[in-house]
Amino acid sequence: MAKPRIATGHFTGCFGCHMSLLDIDERILDLVDIVDFDKSPINDKKRFDQPVDIGIVEGGISNDENLEFLLEFRKNCKILIAMGACAITGGVPSMRNTVPLRECLEEAYLNGPTVEGGIIPNDPDIPVLLDKVYPCHEVVKIDYFLPGCPPSADTLWAALTALLSGQEPELPYELVKYD
């Protein structure tokens, strides 16, 4: 019988949630025994081979590449988990939502205190910024949310092991409280 497949994805954020996933330490060997990893920045696999059982995404959706990538993720994941503040609320990257995009670009590339002779980047290879940074659930259906910045390794472990055993994740308060 084939092992369940897991994929992870990263959008606009600091990568801290993936670091938290790696912080499950030696339990990652247990995880590798019971799942196959598909597309993920951890293994640098760029494309899905087939649909996966569980997808885990972190980061906010800030540009056209993020948007396309999240839509592809949703299409290929039976269960999709948003992990961390950026995926759930837009997090720190969404602080730019309080300023119109044009004004934000002008401040960063034209009018900033350290800018001399700047231009707003317009290379076609650079992803196009969206009007704002979106939390993942505003773009696609998310099945589970793991709060935190980042969620702890124990939180990720508890949610994954519950889902892999066919149960709903029931995370105790200690795993989702943040002081």
Image (spheres, rainbow, N blue to C red):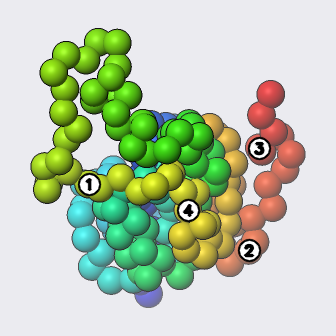
Q: Earlier in the sequence, mark 2 or mark 3?
A: 2
Which mark is drawn over residue 167? 2
Q: Relative to 120, is 56 on the left or the right?
A: right
Q: Earlier in the sequence, mark 1 or mark 4?
A: 1
| Residue 83 seen from this side | no
Which-is-in-front pick, marks 2 and 3? 3
Q: Residues within 10 Å of mark 2 (few under 14, many from 20)?
A: few
Q: Quadrant of the C terminus?
A: top right
Identify which amino acid the numbered label 4 is placed on. Cys
Identify which amino acid the numbered label 3 is placed on. Leu
| Residue 127 seen from this side | yes
Q: Residues within 10 Å of mark 1 (few under 14, many from 20)?
A: few
Q: Earlier in the sequence, mark 3 or mark 4?
A: 4
The residues bearing labels 1 and 2 have C-alpha atoms spaced at a distance of 39 Å
How many numbered callouts?
A: 4
The residues bearing labels 3 and 4 have C-alpha atoms spaced at a distance of 22 Å
Reading the image, the residue beneath label 3 is: 175
Reading the image, the residue beneath label 1 is: 127
Which residue is depicted at the point 81% across and 39% down? 177
Reading the image, the residue beneath label 4 is: 136
Q: Relative to 154, is 124 on the left or the right?
A: left
Which-is-in-front pick, marks 1 and 2? 1
SS of the residue under disc 1: loop
Identify which amino acid the numbered label 2 is placed on. Gln
Which-is-in-front pick, marks 3 and 1? 1
Q: Quadrant of the N terminus?
A: bottom left
Q: Earlier in the sequence, mark 4 or mark 2?
A: 4
**Which quadrant would residue 116 be assigned to in this image?**
top left
Query: Would you place residue 136 above or below residue 43 in this image?
Result: below
Which residue is depicted at the point 44% across and 82% down? 75
